[in-house]
Amino acid sequence: MLARLAATATVAAALVLPVAVAVPVATQPVTPGTVTATRPLPPEHLIPGSASGTAITYRTLGPHDRPALSTGAVFVPPGEPPPGGWPVISWAHGAVGIADSCAPTVSGRIGGPYLGRWLAQGYAIVATDYVGLGTDGLHPYLDGRSEAFAVIDVVRAARAVEPDLSDRWVALGQSQGGQAVMVAATLAESHAPELDHRGTVALGVPSNIENLAVLGGPLFPALPLQGTTVFIAYALAGLRATDPGVDVNSYLSARGEEVLAQVGELCYEQAAAAVGATSIGALFSRQVDEPLLRALREMLAIPIRGYEQPLFLGQGLFDTVVPAPLTFALAKDLTAAGQRFTFRVYPQGHLETMLASEHEAHEFARNVLVR
């Protein structure tokens, strides 16, 4: 009798166990904004004036809209939240590098006094690291859609961690982050309709780069700009990792392969020192053609339509990282497409424009968040 019961139990287990294991794997939802891990940030990594700071890992969409993980952080001001909760600023940072060690939640360089002054205005600050900075895979630098999804989904994730956050939010980004928030502005309503996206502040936006890509090759002209070779190398390294069908290696010179290997392990300041005076042309062994150009257009292009909420665009007249003529062309294209936006030019350089625009950016956010 005992032997028969044991045999029956073995057969039943063989029938039931595959179902019990397979069903959760097949049906488990992959919902953007879902938090998978949290940890308290050390005091030295907190934005000045914050009551608390939490690092989060959350689900989002990466290159080619595939499920991916990103890390980020959420900071809450001191005191009691206003009715409806703390309004949210989703901060998108500029270029820091593409190695995991460069992720702001790893390095602690999340925003400093600049974001502290936003926090002091009564906003919660959420800050994505972007896909691949602190998570699996290489960071796809200047891949606009994946950056944008990370900017949106960190708001969802932060609200799951901090219940006192409002659903009202504004996207704020500088340099690489300026591109990220502009793309996010065109996706926010469709991707996260449960959130109340109120507007976007985009500063030092690297636009129209895809229109210069056709010049890519050994004879690429020298540019009187800062950091351009490193930024191009970051973009090529990210593209090589996320779209192997393009065969980025076939366009690279020996020096280009060396540079991409270097920048994949170094944060921006160290990468700039290592690359030195290497020109963009020295990265290439041959002229770029349609497969690479098409992939770069998909990565880099900033939409000129689809801005349903107010947009503030700021540019430094003396910017040597993102030259003003490129942003003037973006403003012209936005106007021709019938988009309404605020455009301000400051007699400043790249990072200095972030500070010069601060008062107007605060006023813009205040106006859109109370309407």
Image (cartoon, rainbow, N blue to C red):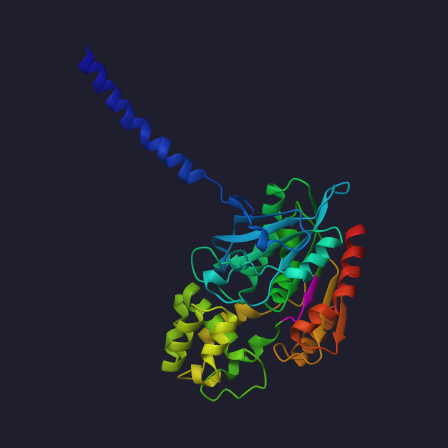
- Measuring 36% from the left and 81% from the top, which residue is drawn there? 254
Inspect the magenta stretch and tell me whether residue 353 lies in it.
no
> Looking at the image, can residue 199 be seen?
no
Whether residue 206 is situated above or below residue 311 in the rendered picture: below
Residue 311 in which image quadrant:
bottom right
Residue at left offset 22%, top offset 18% = 6
The segment highlighted magenta reads 201-205
Q: Nearer the viewer, residue 350 or 67?
A: 350
Q: How many numbered discs, if any?
A: 0
Q: Quadrant of the N terminus?
A: top left
- Residue 349 placement, left or right of 105: right
* Viewer-proximal residue among 127 and 1: 127
Q: Position of residue 330 (x, y in %)?
A: 68, 74
Image coords of residue 183 (percent x, y): 62, 62
**x and y percentages locating residue 347 in the rendered image:** 74, 79
* Position of residue 175 in the picture relative to residue 101 (left or right): right
Q: Nearer the viewer, residue 274 or 366?
A: 274
Q: Is 179 left or right of 336, judged from the image as shown?
A: left
